[in-house]
Amino acid sequence: MARPIIHAYRAAEPGLCVNSYLVEGESGVVVVDTSLLVSDIEALRARLRALKKPLLAILVTHPHPDHFNGVAALVHDREVPVYAAASVGRVIEDIAGAKREQWTPTYGTEWPAETYYPNSLLADRAQVRFAELTFTVRELGPAESHADSYFLLSAGSHRPVAFTGDLAFHGTHPYTADGHTAAWLAALDILAGEFAGVGTLYPGHGDPGPPVFAEQRRYLLYYREVVRRLSGGGPGLSGAAKAELAAAMEAFLPGAPLAWMIGLGADAVAGELAAADAPAAAR
Ligand SMILES: [Zn+2]
C-alpha cells in the first residue's frame, strides 16, 4: 500500500506562519487545519484543487482562528465532514465571534466573512477512516489553547505520524495568551510518553520532524520564570517589563519568527501565576 503523501501549505508571517496539511490518500484528500487569512486560504484551496482528488474531510486540531478560519471556504457548498474533538468544537462555537471582533480591525477583508463550525464532534480516542487512512483523535484539554488535541494518522504498516496543532511550536515563539501554561506543561509530559512509536510530527508552526516536546517545555519553563520575576507576583507586566521579557525570550530563541507573541501573552501568564501562587483562602 502506498504511503499517503503529506503536502504542507505554510502562510507567511502576517498569517502567523501557520501550517495546513493536505493528506493525499488513494481516493481523496483530508485537510488538517485551514489557515487564517483569506489570501492564504485561497492558496490552500488552489493546492487542494491541483491534487485533482475529492476532499474527504477536514480535521481541526484546536480552537484558534489560524487553524479553523479556512473551513468555510474549503467546504464551500459541499457536504464535507468537519471533525474535531468535542471540546475543540465547543470552544470554537464560544470564541469565533469574539475573535472576529478582536482581529477584524487589524486584518480587515483578510479575515474570512463566515465561520463554519465542526459538524462531527469526536470523543477522545475516537477513530475516523477514509479507505486506507485511519485518524485517531486525542483530546488533551486546555494547553496552548482552551482545548487542544492531536490526530494520529495510521496507514497500513507504515509508522504512524501525528498532526499536533500547537501543542509544540517548532522554532517559532509560541502563543501563550490563553494563560494555561501549567496545564500545557502537564500535557507535554503526557505527550512525551504517548509519542514513543510515532514517526514524524507535523506541527502547526515550524518544520515537521521528530517530536519537539522537550524544547517546548524548556521554553515555557523559562518564560514562566522570567514573567514571575518581572511581575513580582502581580497580575500583569509594565511596558518596560514586557520589553525585558521579549529581550530574554529572543535571546533564548535567536532569530525565531512571531516574536510579537512574547509580549502578547505576558499579562495572561502573569495572571495565571498570580492566581496559582495566591494562598488558597484568598482565591
Ligand atoms: Zn496556531
Image: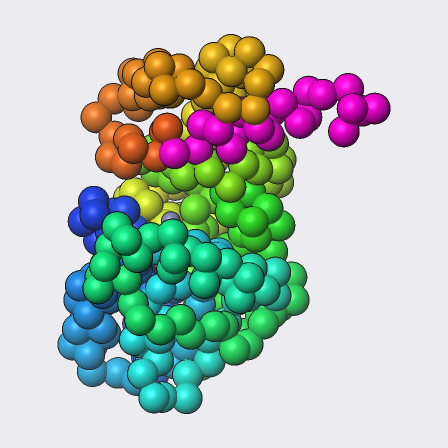
Compared across the picture, whether 15 is left or right of 214 comes to left
Q: Could you tell me residue 238's position as x and y percent?
A: 42, 18
> Is 241 or 187 nearer to us in this picture?
241
Q: Nearer the viewer, residue 256 or 16?
A: 16
Q: Is residue 202 visible?
A: no
Residue placed furthest toward the right? 281
Q: Main secondary structure of the magenta part?
A: helix
Q: Is residue 86 visible?
A: yes
Query: Vertically, is 243 above or below 206?
Result: above
- Left or right position of 190 against 259: right
Residue 262: image quadrant is top left
Look at the image and say whether residue 269 sits in the magenta stretch.
yes
Please tell me in which quadrant of the rendered image residue 248 appears: top left
Above-or-below relation of 263 to 8: above
Q: State yes or no: residue 156 in magenta.
A: no
Q: Residue at x 65, y 66 (%)?
A: 123
At x 47%, y 12%, the residue is: 230
Percent of width and height locating residue 273: 60, 24
Quarter of the figure with the C terminus: top right
Residue 36 on image: x %, y %:
30, 58
Q: Image point 51% across, 41% down: which residue?
A: 178
At x 57% / y 52%, what residue is drawn? 147
Image quadrant occupied by the N terminus: bottom left
Q: Nearer the viewer, residue 38 or 86?
A: 38
Foreground of the two, 178 or 28: 178
Where 89 sits versus 186, above or below?
below
* Magenta-tinted stretch: 264-283
Colour convention: rainbow
Q: Is residue 184 left or right of residue 254?
A: right
Q: Position of residue 40 (x, y in %)?
A: 20, 61
